[in-house]
Image: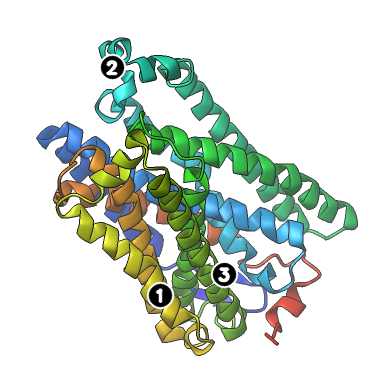
Amino acid sequence: MKWDSKTYTITDKGNFGTISLVIGIIGLAASAGGYMADSEQLFFSYLTAFAFWFTLAAGGLFLTMLHHLTGATWSVVLRRVAESLMWVLPFMAIFFIPILFGMHDLYHWTHHEAVAEDALLKGKEPFLNMGFFITRLVIYFVVWTGLALILAKLSRNQDSGHSEALRLKFVRTSAPGMILFALTLTFAAFDWLMSLDPHWYSTIFGVYVFAGGICAMFSLLIVLLMGMRKQGVMDTVVTVEHYHDLGKLAFAFMIFWGYMAFSQYFLIWYGNIPEETIWFLHRWEGSWKVVTLTLVFGHFVVPFLIMITRGAKRRLGSLKLLAYWLLLMHLVDMHWLVMPTLHKHGVHIGWIDFAPVIGIGGIFFWIFWNRFASRPVVPVGDPRLDASINFVNH
C-alpha cells in the first residue's frame, strides 16, 4: 500500500480489498451453510450482522452531512473516509434481500393467524404489514442512496475547482437531508429491530440505535485511519489533533448512547406496565443478565472512566484499543437487541452468529476500499484543506 503525498492519491492499493472480498465470500458461503443447518437461527444472526454494518455506513452519511452543515475545518481531511463509508449504503439494500426471505421467521406480525387472534396486533396491522413494510424499505434506501449519490457527485466536482455555489449546494443538500436521515433512520429502527417484538414500543428506540451507531462509526474511523497510518498512508495528513477530536466525538456519542439507554429503561421501569417491561425482562433472564451488565459496564462505565482523560484520546495506542472495544460493544448491543426474541431464556452463541458478520463485513470493506482508493484521499479542491492538515486543538 503506497500513496503520493503530493497528489494525495493511493498509487498502490495493496491487497486489503482483495483479502476483504475473499473473507466476505467465505463468510457468505458459511452463512448459506448456516441456512441449511438452522434457517431460523441464520435469519436472526443475519439481521444482527446487517444492523451492525448498516449503522456504520449510515454513520458515514451522517458525518458527511454534519461536516457540510457546520462548516468545520478540522474534519476536512476525514471527509473522504466518511464519504466512502456512505458509499456502501446503496449496496446495503442488496444485503437486505435475505431478510425479506426470512420475514416469517423473524417477525411475529407476519403470521396472519397470530394477528387475527391478537387485538393489539390487529390494531397495528395498518402499519405492520408486508406491503407497507416493503414500501417504507424502498423509501428509506431511495432517500439514503439519493443523498449519498448527490453528495458524492458534488465532492467529485469540487476536486476540479471550488466555488461558493458548490459550497451552498453541499449545505442545501445536507440541511433537508439531515431531517430525512433522522426520520428514515428512526422508522427503519422501528421496522427492522423494534417490531421483532410487536407488543413492545419505545419512542426513544430510534435515537438509541442512532447514538450507538454513530459512536461505533467514529470508532471505525479511528481504526481505519490508524491502519492506514501504519502503512504510511495519510500519516502526515491525519495527526494526533484529528485523532483527539475523533476520540472526543466517540466519547460524546458513547455518553449519549448511555443517556438514551438509561432514559428508555427508567421511563419503562417507573411506569411498570407489563407490556412494556416484558422486553427488559427477557434481557434479564438467565445468561442475558450477563450481556445486559456487559453493556452497562463495557459500553459505558469503564470506557467513560478511561476516555474522560485527555491523554487517553491523544495516546494513539490506547485510543485504538478503545475504538476496537467500542466496535465490539456495538456488535454485542445489536445482538442484545435481536437475539432475545429467538432465545428468550439465555444466550446461545454458535458459528452461525459469526458467519454473516464476517460475510457482510468483508464485502463492506471491499466496497469501501475500492471507493476510497479510486480518487484523492482528501478533497483536494476544498480551500480549507491546508488549515485542516495544520489543525491544532486548543
Q: Is residue 278 left or right of residue 351?
A: right
Whether residue 130 is visible here, answered yes or no, is: yes
Instruction: Find residue 271 and report its horizontal and vertical position in percent.
Output: 42, 43
Residue displayed at 74% across by 68% down: 72
Residue displayed at 67% across by 46% down: 178
Q: Report the coloring of the rendering.
A: rainbow
User: Label 3: few (<14), some or many (≥20) within 10 Å?
Assistant: some
In this rendering, the answer to whether 101 lies above or below 78 is above
Q: Is residue 363 left or right of residue 46?
A: right
User: Label 2: few (<14), some or many (≥20) within 10 Å?
Assistant: few
Identify the residue under disc 2.
111
Which label was assigned to residue 249? 3
In this rendering, the answer to whether 237 lies above or below 68 is below
What amino acid is labelled 1 in the image? Answer: Pro
In this rendering, the answer to whether 241 lies above or below 47 is below
Secondary element at image label 3: helix
Residue displayed at 43% across by 55% down: 261
User: Which residue is more in the foreground, 276 or 113?
Assistant: 276
User: Which residue is more in the foreground, 23 or 36?
Assistant: 36
Between label 1 and label 3, give the one nearer the viewer. Answer: 1
User: Which residue is more in the foreground, 242 or 12?
Assistant: 242
Real-space Cα separation, disc 2 to disc 3, in angstroms:
42 Å
Instruction: Find residue 237 and report its horizontal and vertical position in percent.
Output: 62, 79
What amino acid is labelled 3 in the image? Answer: Leu
What amino acid is labelled 2 in the image? Answer: His
Q: Quadrant of the C terminus?
A: bottom right
Identify the residue under disc 1.
303
Real-space Cα separation, disc 1 to disc 2, in angstroms:
42 Å
Instruction: Find residue 30 and report its horizontal and vertical position in percent.
Output: 19, 45
